[in-house]
Image: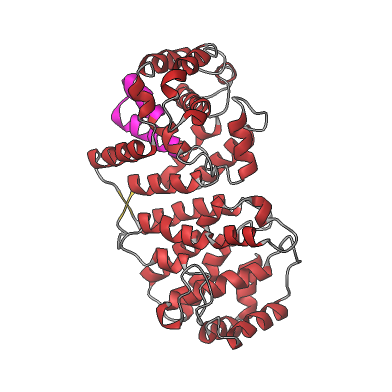
């Protein structure tokens, strides 16, 4: 089987950046948690594979957070009574993603107090790893307001003191002791600045043996992130997965080879990853969007394109996913590309996206009937916006495609 040349370390680092878009004002939260957790693990003398694993767990620990309002609650105080919901959701997402399923249990408990963890029938290794994530996560909440300013050098002793008061309650004493020791130097905190953080993560990637993901693993990783995106709204549940199914089938109807079909499916799964930056207030709005809200929504396809460029450097996946709002007459977004600049796969995903969205309920309308949908997409062909050949393939087997769209 061909391998898509995607490095595991780079993929997780980039996709962590996508998760951080949910925070908007707390970008790089996952990376800071990851680097702090790894530093503590190294000081504890954990084997290198364990240190690397906790780094990846840190970058992905908030994969259960899709909504900006939820993220704000999680960063407002050290403890929030609703925190466990995203832990359960994230653990569920990871357990279904074979390449990352080994991280599921620690993500499940990464907001559980240490004193509570001691009462639960949890493997001691998972207990300590989960609590290490909790500690690093809460330290980042305390330091976040001081980031990118010299004030952190004045205030960090107070952060250490605060964490010490929670030893044995929220956090394992041995973890608090190590954190207090390694954090009592300015360099620990200054390393959290974005440029230094990215540099350190690149260095870690260079120093480890590269591991490549094959197509099956890539599809599982893409499906994981599609679930994170679609969880932003009850109106978009399974949207990305169903767009991927429709797009793959349409491409197959055109006789596309199996390897390209897999890439089309991945592009379909990830076409909306840029929406992680968009507030659920906009996605769930029952009425017309304001110009400002529309501008925020319109940038999501560009964010998708740029995020995927960093993961799939030698593939058309970023183009096929990021161009799904382009039109044949060049009045789409974000590039305003026209007919001659759009691959068949771009046109297929554009049709699949519109077809599935019309078949799914939205806050401003009910589910559309198949007859209505076919009339709508044909009108877009007539206007020159959608590809007539792609729409013809879909129309020829419309009931099958409708079942793919609505389960």
Question: Is there any visible trace of residue 41 in the rendered image?
Answer: no
Residue 20 coordinates in the image, percent (x, y): 49, 43
The image's colour scheme reads secondary structure
- Which residue appears at 50% of the width and 51% of the height? 225
Quadrant (top left, top right, bottom left, bottom right) of the N terminus: bottom left
257 or 343, which is in the foreground? 343
User: Magenta span: helix, strand or loop, mainly?
Assistant: helix
Residue 158 coordinates in the image, percent (x, y): 49, 15
160 or 90, which is in the foreground? 160
Residue 163 coordinates in the image, percent (x, y): 51, 16
Q: Is residue 187 left or right of residue 326?
A: left
339 or 95, which is in the foreground? 339
Q: Which residues, given as a range, are shown in magenta?
A: 36-59
- In the image, residue 41 sits, relative to residue 231, either above or below, namely above
Residue 91 coordinates in the image, percent (x, y): 54, 39
Quadrant (top left, top right, bottom left, bottom right) of the C terminus: bottom right
- Which residue appears at 46% of the width and 42% of the height? 101
Question: Is there any visible trace of residue 399 in the rendered image?
Answer: yes
Rendering quarter of residue 77: top right
User: Magenta stretch containing residue 204, yes or no?
Assistant: no
Rendering quarter of residue 361: bottom right
Q: Is residue 168 left or right of residue 34?
A: right
380 or 345, which is in the foreground? 380
User: Magenta stretch containing residue 44, yes or no?
Assistant: yes
Q: Is residue 232 left or right of residue 216?
A: right
Farthest residue to the front: give it.
150
- Which residue appears at 53% of the width and 60% of the height? 299
């Amino acid at each position: 089987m061909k391998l898509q040349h995607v490095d595991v370390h780079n993929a997780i680092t980039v996709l962590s950046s996508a998760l951080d878009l949910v925070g908007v004002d707390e970008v790089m939260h996952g990376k800071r948690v990851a680097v702090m957790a790894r530093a503590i693990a190294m000081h504890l003398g954990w084997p290198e594979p364990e240190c690397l694993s906790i780094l990846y767990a840190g970058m992905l620990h908030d994969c259960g957070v899709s909504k900006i309002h939820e993220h704000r609650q999680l960063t407002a105080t050290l403890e929030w009574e609703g925190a466990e919901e995203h832990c359960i959701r994230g653990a569920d997402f990871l357990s279904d993603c074979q390449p990352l399923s080994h991280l599921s249990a620690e993500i499940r408990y990464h907001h559980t107090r240490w004193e509570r963890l001691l009462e639960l029938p949890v493997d001691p290794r998972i207990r300590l790893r989960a609590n290490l994530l909790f500690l690093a996560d809460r330290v980042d909440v305390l330091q976040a307001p001081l980031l990118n300013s010299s004030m952190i050098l004045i205030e960090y002793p107070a952060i250490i003191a605060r964490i010490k008061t929670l030893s044995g309650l929220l956090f394992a004493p041995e973890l608090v002791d190590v954190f207090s020791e390694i954090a009592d130097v300015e360099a620990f905190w200054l390393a959290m600045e974005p440029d230094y953080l990215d540099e350190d993560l690149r260095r870690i990637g260079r120093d480890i043996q590269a591991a490549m993901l094959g197509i099956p693993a890539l599809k599982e990783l893409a499906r994981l992130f599609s679930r994170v995106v679609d969880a932003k709204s009850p109106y978009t549940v399974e949207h990305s997965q169903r767009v991927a199914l429709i797009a793959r089938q349409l491409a197959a109807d055109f006789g596309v080879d199996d390897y390209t079909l897999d890439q089309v499916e991945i592009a379909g799964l990830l076409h909306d990853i840029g929406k992680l930056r968009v507030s659920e207030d906009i996605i769930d709005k029952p009425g017309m969007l304001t110009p400002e809200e529309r501008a925020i929504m319109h940038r999501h396809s560009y964010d998708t394109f740029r995020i995927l460029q960093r993961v799939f450097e030698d593939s058309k996946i970023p183009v096929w996913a990021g161009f799904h709002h382009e039109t044949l007459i060049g009045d789409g977004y974000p590039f305003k590309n026209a007919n001659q600049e759009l691959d068949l796969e771009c046109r297929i995903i554009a049709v699949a996206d519109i077809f599935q969205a019309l078949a799914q309920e939205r806050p401003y309308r009910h589910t559309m009937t198949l007859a209505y949908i076919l009339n709508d997409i044909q009108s877009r062909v007539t206007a020159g916006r959608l590809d007539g050949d792609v729409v013809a393939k879909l129309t020829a087997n419309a009931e099958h495609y409708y079942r793919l769209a609505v389960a």
